[in-house]
Amino acid sequence: MDNDGTVDYDGYFVGFIVGVRPAFNLNLSSIIFTSDAAGIKSGAAGTLSEPGDHKTTNWKLTVKDNNLSVTSGTVTRSESTITVPFTASGSYDRISVFISDGAWNADGAVLKYYGALNTSGSSGTFTLPNDYDTSWKVYILAEKINGNTETDYASTPAEITIPDGTEYTVTCSDDGHGTASASATTATAGTEITLTATPNGGYTFKEWQVVSGGVTITNNKFTMPASNVEVKAIFEALPPSTYSVTMTNDGHGSATATPTSGTTGTTVTIKATASNGYQFKEWVVESGGVTVTDASKATTTFDIGNSNVKIKAVFKKKSGGGGGSKDDDSDDSGSGSEDSKPKDEKPFDYLDELRAKLATAISLGGEQTVTWDKGTALPYDIMKTLQDNPKITLVFSYTYQNVDYKVTLPGKNVKAYTTIPWYGPLYLYAYYGGRGAVQNASKINTANRTYTVVHGDTLTGIAIKLNTTVKSLMSLNNIKDPDKIKEGQILRY
């Protein structure tokens, strides 16, 4: 080249203008793309895409920048649409994808496809070219675009694997106690499949079993392999629900249930006991939707359904009075009327309420306390119930000879003796009235003790209740006939 800018060739003047490119000291391993500035031609690894490209005058480079990086997750495919999850760092303008017929930095590799991913969040899609060959290499890179003529910068290309376009089957089965389904019945390798299991009533989902395909299921999802997959939903029975049985009454008697709770189908026996002057009328189901076998019978049954049960005992006043109370079952048998029975057969029916309270406390289980404030004495059967149930405590409050007493009878400390049918107020206070009660009991003024006869009383029953004898009562009260006492009569003892 002469000083005037003309070029000689082998000593001969060249009569036409020749363009000369400047020389650069470039690290070719850092060049990812060469392309003309107008974007007409492009090549990978610094190569030209076809002969004659050296005639292009303005060239642009895409150079690797170590401050940029990108990695890919599991690539999925739906026909020719490829979905690429990615993680990128650095300041980049887009995630690009390119395909070459060889490794991106190999000599002679030719760029077959180049474009931007259609990104949404941390995932992007692109469409495979129609002439895609499975031997080609596919890469993504984070790219910084600097206009039409300046150098671009990009991360080291990250190779991705394009799944086989073959679709494989997904089969779901179950063990008969529920249903199973998948988000797709066919899918290509790499596709995420979501499983759904729905249990039948009384069952809950337990686990997925992989019958074939060798997949790993996590949170009801797995990634489709390059093979068919079969999974099976396994269910297990739920533990049966336990429902409570609550008994109420209208205030004229008591009601008990055995048992007081149970699972669906459990048979419960219910019993009503009327107060003095009343008799059982009917059962009323307040909640639970159960059917009582015989609603007019004081002792009957029902089967627990699928909810808690509440049943009320309803009583009615007896016509013509009569002493004592009884279970007024419609099918009661026996000769004679209630009044024809011995008067002392059941003279203390008011204690049935206490018996019901104790039965309820026992059915609840654990430590339970029952309070009672009627009468002044306790019969043998009550004491025996306490003795047999050491976790039950009875707190008995009563007034005797114008003195108020409160005794505590822990079941674990109670002693019931078959030789003592009734435990009177002084006995109870002496043994269950607290520290020093035995000594204090001897100091109680027993003079002028009286008892008022109530409906249903017999002289025998009164003697038992007061820890005395019929003979003593007859003597103190000048009674000639022990069967002739009347309600309201005041007896000394």
Image: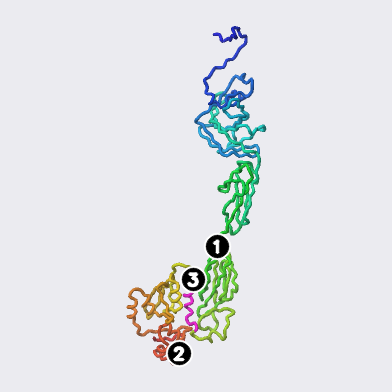
Disc number for residue 482: 2
| Secondary-structure class at tag 2 | loop
Residue 354 in the magenta stretch? The answer is yes
Of tags 3 and 2, the one toward the viewer is 3
At x 52%, y 83%, the residue is: 321
Find residue 151 and report its horizontal and vertical position in percent: 54, 25
Residue 280 in the magenta stretch? The answer is no
Find residue 347 and report its horizontal and vertical position in percent: 48, 82
Disc number for residue 53: none
Of tags 1 and 3, the one toward the viewer is 1
Identify the image quadrant of the C terminus: bottom left
Q: What is the C-alpha distance between the residues marked 3 and 2?
A: 38 Å
Whichever of labels 3 and 2 marks the residue nearer the N terminus, that label is: 3
Compared with 209, 400 (above or below) is below
Magenta-colored span: 345-355
The residue tagged 3 is 360
Could you tell whether 94 is left or right of 385 in the image?
right
Compared with 413, 339 (above or below) is below
Find residue 271 and report its horizontal and vertical position in percent: 54, 74
Find residue 357 and report its horizontal and vertical position in percent: 47, 72
The residue tagged 1 is 241
